Amino acid sequence: MIMELRSMSADEKRRHTKAIVKEMSFMADQGVTRISLAPVGRKALPTRLVLRVKFDASGAYERHKARWVALGFLARIGLEFYSAYSPTTMLATSRILFAVAAKHGLNVAHCDLPQAFLSTPVDRPIWVQLPRGISLKSDVIREFQKKYPGGKPALRLLRALYGLRSSPALSSKRLAAFMSDLGMQRS
């Protein structure tokens, strides 16, 4: 059983289970991982499910949400990541931009890139475990064990996952390349 669901009411369990199925199905559909054998000496990073109840701006219930995250603080530099740097805007810079926009009557907009990390390919081999309580179908395990007798299956990440130390840097690099392709340049 998924640990996070143990102390919940039946209705909460049902809603969170639905959110978990949605999240894990999305991951499978997007090709975030593939079943693999981790090399000798490499450990698969543990992962967990983060469960939340989301509310809208007025405080009314919106939905239950599950997110599969890597426990990236256990990643080893040089193996699972080299760089965790991702540029951010300083608060003072944002305030200046808002002040200029207000003075000149300009509209300010922002955008959210949904599932931004999950669309970003990883730049090195990283293996992760499924969260506790989630398992692969038995026929997938049987097929794997035919191919790798005695091997323990792990999931090789093909795309960045929330919680990885390198995810923000990889996502930022991908966004910068996209903006450059549009003819923009960093200042």
Image (cartoon, rainbow, N blue to C red):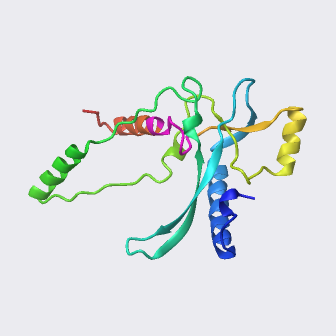
Q: Which quadrant: the C terminus?
A: top left
Whole-percent x and y of residue 100? 13, 51
Q: Is residue 163 shown in magenta?
A: yes
> Majority secondary structure of the magenta segment?
loop
Choose top left, top right, bottom left or bottom right for residue 34: top right
Whole-percent x and y of residue 134? 73, 53
Q: Which residue is rendered at x = 68% and y = 71% of the image? A: 14
**Does residue 53 sit above or below 137 in this rendering?**
below
Residue that lies at the very extreme toward the front in this rendered image: 7
Query: Which of these two is toward me, 22 or 179?
Result: 22
Q: Which residue is rendered at x = 75% and y = 24% of the image? A: 40
On screen, residue 121 versus residue 178, left or right, reads: right
Choose top left, top right, bottom left or bottom right for residue 156: top right
Q: Is residue 109 shown in magenta?
A: no
Query: Which of these two is toward me, 184 or 3?
Result: 3
Q: Is residue 159 visible?
A: yes
Whole-percent x and y of residue 6? 70, 64
Residue that lies at the very extreme toward the left in this rendered image: 103
User: What is the count of numbered marks?
Assistant: 0
Q: Which residue is rendered at x = 49% and y = 67% of the image? A: 54
**Does residue 18 sit above or below 181 in this rendering?**
below
On screen, residue 60 versus residue 91, left or right, reads: right
Q: Is residue 31 visible?
A: no
Query: Which of these two is toward me, 103 or 1?
Result: 1
Q: Which quadrant: the N terminus?
A: bottom right
Bounds of the magenta span? 160-170
